[in-house]
Image (cartoon, rainbow, N blue to C red):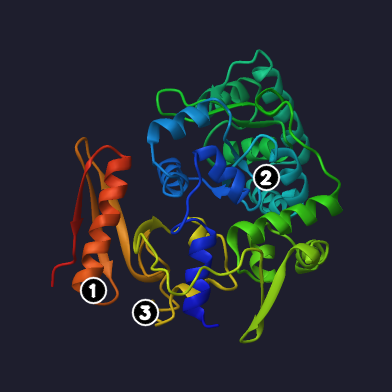
Amino acid sequence: MDDRMIARWRAHTMRLWGHTYPSAEAVVDGMLAVQGENPSQAAWAVATRTTSPDQAAYDRAFDAGEILRTHVLRPTWHLVRPADIRWLLDVTRRGVRRTYDQGARELGIDAATRTRACDVIASCLADGRARTRAELGEVLVGAGLPGEGRPLGVLLGDAELEALICSGPLRDGRHTHALLADRAPKARQLDRDAALAELALRYVRSHGPVTDRDLAYWASLTLTDARAGLAAVTDQLETFEHGDRTFWFHDPPPPGDVPAAPRAHLLQVLDEFHNGVQDSRDVLDVAGLRSPDRPATVGMVLVDQQMVGGMRRTVTDRTVRFDLELLRELTGDEVDAVHAAAARYGAFLDRESEVRYPTA
């Protein structure tokens, strides 16, 4: 076992090659959660793992509430399925709330204000009609509460963390908020021990091989809770030692003699392949091409499951342009693979793809 093999195995587990999910809903169900603060990036992160990437199919699933968006796992938005939203909030709320509590203190927003804001938001949405962020902000201002900028973000995040609201349907391309009870009336609830166990099992099944610290990072858990969740499902998982770390996995590695196809990907750093792990993210850069003190750019150029450059995407009415910042020279076959990745992305957006390389 080496780092490249782990990266190849993990990409297979995450359905970036070898097999795919049949639909957008199946992706979110299989991955348990997909990081989703940037709507267009999240749509591709889901679609690229499906058999036939289709923006319209993703939008229909989102508008119908088959995919929901809320602050869960970490202090950012994630896409989750209605059945999972409540128990995921319950098990990860403690870790996420620390960030929100700090933000509220910095802004001088006290507990009474946060509680009153939740009441005002709930009353506004009780008629069953979804509201945009701006519309809820106006309602809060009308009630004498903060309704703009960062304070509004804290108050809406509070309402999401408390399982009061979540995403509603898109309206003219804008996100809306609706009552979670209306969008997920059959959401499951689990006690904490059962939730930790299910979280650990489904994370390893969809992201492995991973370490206990990867799980702790992904779900804002203490290392103690992450290990407790893994311990509860050891009969359903396997491990191996590599370096000074223990890796957990569910499905065996793909056959070594089967070529990974597609070979290249253009993904945002928010993609689960990058942001779904932290402790073992280094397996994506075996050659050490990226300087440790230089953060990843908006996007990644991946070839053979290794990061070979950064990428920025620009969408126009007719084209999608990918400006690459390569960390090493690509071979002819690798260039072909990258252009094929750009074409897949372009087809999803119903646009012609264009790849630009840095000029000397």
How far, Cα to Cα, is label 3 from label 1?
A: 13 Å
Q: Earlier in the sequence, mark 3 or mark 1?
A: 3
Residue under label 2: 108
Residue under label 1: 330
Residue under label 3: 289
Residue 32 position, x and y percent, is 63, 48
Residue 171 position, x and y percent, is 45, 23
Quadrant of the image for the N terminus?
Answer: bottom right
Secondary structure beneath dot 3 equals loop
- Disc tally is 3
Secondary structure beneath dot 1 equals loop
| Callout 2 amino acid | Gly
Which dot, 2 or 1, sits closer to the camera?
1
In the picture provided, is 142 more to the left or to the right than 54? right
> What residue is rendered at 82% in x and 67% in y?
231
> What residue is rendered at 61% in x and 43% in y?
29
